[in-house]
Image (cartoon, rainbow, N blue to C red):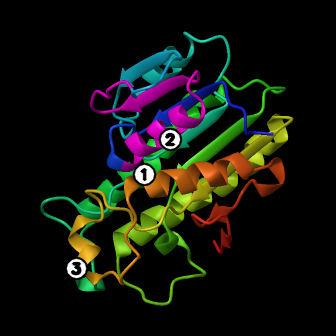
Amino acid sequence: MFDQPRTVLLAGASGDLARAIGAEIVRRYPDIALLTLSRAAVDRVPGHAGERRHLTVSLADEHSIQSVEAFLSEFSSPPDWVINCCGLLHDKFHGPEKSLAQCEDDWLVQSMRINLLTHLHLAQALDRKLLRKQPLLWVSLSAKVGSIGDNELGGWYSYRISKASLNMLIKNLSIEWGRRLESSCVVAVHPGTTDTVLSKPFQGNLAPGKLYSPALSAGRIVDVVEQLAPADSGNLFFWDGSRLPW
């Protein structure tokens, strides 16, 4: 049902994995209309023959809702696919907390702003543009460590808390939009540990073969996306298409 998109909206589009996802979508659908949102400019994907529109915006900011609404109003219908790649694990001064004593309010709040609010704000901007009879596929890149049922190691407080919150947002959205739209699928996807800026400080701890190139992860993610159906809505998926516990 969702395997022939005409328009794709890619948020957090300047990140390493997001750029690879954009390139993979264009490789499969060269004539696609590609709409991108990010805090930085994004180059046109080589080989892309379709319409290309970009909005420079910080989705962590509540004012972005109006900006994105205005941006989407320029188009006659909402996008068929929405893929939100916004996320944060560390910065120059903070990393994942190994213990309760390392938790700081400001870092937890920042993690929530980037890992949760960027997805909430985009959903709010899209909400009034949805058409009951037009199928909608929404994918948020999440993380396996945000699964409460899968957590047996602890630690990484802010990241786990914010990703678990994102997962609950996805569940709520799947229910609300499932009632309003004739065909919708709202999911979260764990891409696996990908060779990006986000994972750099932690790559030395990985077992051989567990670090994936952005191109490989992007291909896997789009493979999962193309196989989704309304019955899959409200779930967290691994990069191989298997379901993860919430």
- Which residue is labeled 3 in the image? 102
Q: In the structure shown, which secondary structural element does the residue marked by tag 2 occupy?
A: helix
Q: What secondary structure is found at the residue carrying circle 1?
A: helix
Q: Secondary structure at mark 3?
A: helix
Q: Is residue 134 above or below residue 27?
A: above
Identify the residue position indicated by label 1 in the image.
215
Magenta stretch bounds: 17-44
Dot 1, crowdedness within 10 Å: few (<14), some or many (≥20)? some
How many discs appear?
3
Name the residue at 49% across, 51% down.
218
Residue at the spot of label 2: 24
Q: Are marks 2 and 1 in contact (CB under 8 Å)?
A: yes
Q: Is residue 5 left or right of residue 45?
A: right
The kind of residue on which mark 1 rests is Ala
Please tell me which of labels 2 and 3 falls first in the chain: 2
| Residue at the outermost left position | 93
Tag 3: Cα neighbours inside 10 Å, few (<14), some, or many (≥20)? few
- Give the mark nearest the N terminus, 2 or 1: 2
Q: In the rendering, at what x and y percent does residue 155 appear?
A: 36, 83
